[in-house]
Every structure is written in C-alpha cells, then in structure tokens.
Image: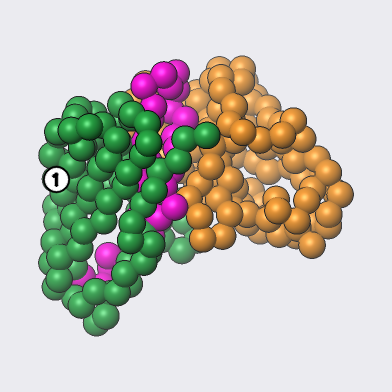
Amino acid sequence: ETGVTQSPTHLIKTRGQQVTLRCSSQSGHNTVSWYQQALGQGPQFIFQYYREEENGRGNFPPRFSGLQFPNYSSELNVNALELDDSALYLCASSQGLARIEEQYFGPGTRLTVT
Amino acid sequence: GQQLNQSPQSMFIQEGEDVSMNCTSSSIFNTWLWYKQDPGEGPVLLIALYKAGELTSNGRLTAQFGTTRKDSFLNISASIPSDVGIYFCAGLPSHNAGNMLTFGGGTRLMVKP
C-alpha cells in the first residue's frame, strides 16, 4: 500500500450535478496531482497542487477545480457533470516537485455519470 | 497536446515467454517511466529512466530510454501469471516544472497459464 487514500471508492451522479472527490496524501508529502483515467485509456493530468497553490493544469475546463488544505490533503470538484466525466479519478502525492520516482498513486475513485 | 503512443495495445503470451512493449512520442521527454496497474488499484512505478540511452533493470524487467529521447522500451523476461495487468509508459517533457506526467494508452498483458 502507498499510504495515499481516496474517498469515496465509487460514486454515481446524474448529468448536471456537482461532485467532490477527496485525497489524503502520504505522510510527509506536500504535493498532490490529480488524473482522470477513462475506461481503456491511460491517465490524463488534470492539475497539481504544491503547498496549497495550484502548480500546473492540464487541458481540462474550468468546471474542474481543486483545493489543497494545510494538512496537504486535497479535493477535486467537478461542476455541471457530463456523461464523458465518467472515469477513474486518481490522485498521486509526492514530497516536492523533483523526485518523480517517489510519487505514489492512490487506488482511485470510480465516478459514473448517468 | 503531447501524446505517447504505446504498442502493442494488448498481448497474450505463454507463461515463460519474454515480452516486449514500446512507447513513442513526437516530442522529447527528459524522463521516461514505466508503471503497472492492477484492477482496482492505482499505477505502481516499475522503472524510472533519466538519461538518453540508459538501460535499467528491476528483477525480470528491463527498460531503455531511447537515444532520440522520443521513445522507450520495456522487456519482461520469463513471464509469470502475476505479470498480468496493464503496463503504462509515462514521460516528463523537458519544460516540466513538476511531476505532471503524460501517459501512454497502455499495454494489456494477458498470460496463458
């Protein structure tokens, strides 16, 4: 186990609704990255938080937003859900921005939008 | 945006056989990584490569950072049933300021017992 936890494990929402996913980073890690993994595809980078600030963002619309808290846990919020938002949402935590080999992924939250 | 093309998309192999998969990009990457993802879990790092031409092993796994910096290869020797899963390549482009990975589409490995 990596020490990165995500909640909930599974979630079903209706198109147009809003959802909040949560990630607890591994102890000592101050950086959290979020990825979207559609069925049968590789993960796609959404955004990254470093010391409570957004450090970078992938090609996702503004209705995808996030937060990082003083304890370095993080939330991913998605507004106005669309059917294509159905995916596994992964978070990964690391200590700082440099050591990619020390970035660990959580098990993900499976979101289904109907 | 940047894309990593991974092949093959899936493969069936006989237990004990060697496996090869590769990943190519139209742009340069400074770091190449190979992950394995099992059902219900997040990707787990297998091998990280930092230098063009680098060849690195992790048990039965060997990966290479292509000399053009636009490709990488993963080999698994003497496959066993627990090698089943999806293997992803991932890269960090040269301008990357953090651990923001670009992933390939994955190679699904299925082993015949």
Res. A93 visible in picture: no
Asked where in the image residue B30 lies, by quadrant, the reply is: top left
Asked where in the image residue B94 lies, by quadrant, the reply is: top left
Which residue is identified by label 1?
B57
Residue B55: x and y in percent read 13, 39
Looking at the rendered image, the quarter that the C terminus of chain A falls into is bottom right
- The kind of residue on which mark 1 rests is Ser
Q: Is residue B112 left or right of residue B58?
A: right
Q: Colour of chain B?
A: green
Output the letter for the chain in orange: A
Please tell me whether residue B40 is drawn above or below residue A48 in the rendered image: below
Taking the spot 55% from the left edge, 50% from the top edge, the residue there is A37
Depth check: B2 or A81 in front? B2
Please tell me whether residue B28 is drawn above or below residue A18 in the rendered image: above
Taking the spot 26% from the left edge, 56% from the top edge, the residue there is B21
Residue A79: x and y in percent read 80, 40
Which range is magenta?
Answer: B80-106
Mark 1, chain letter?
A: B
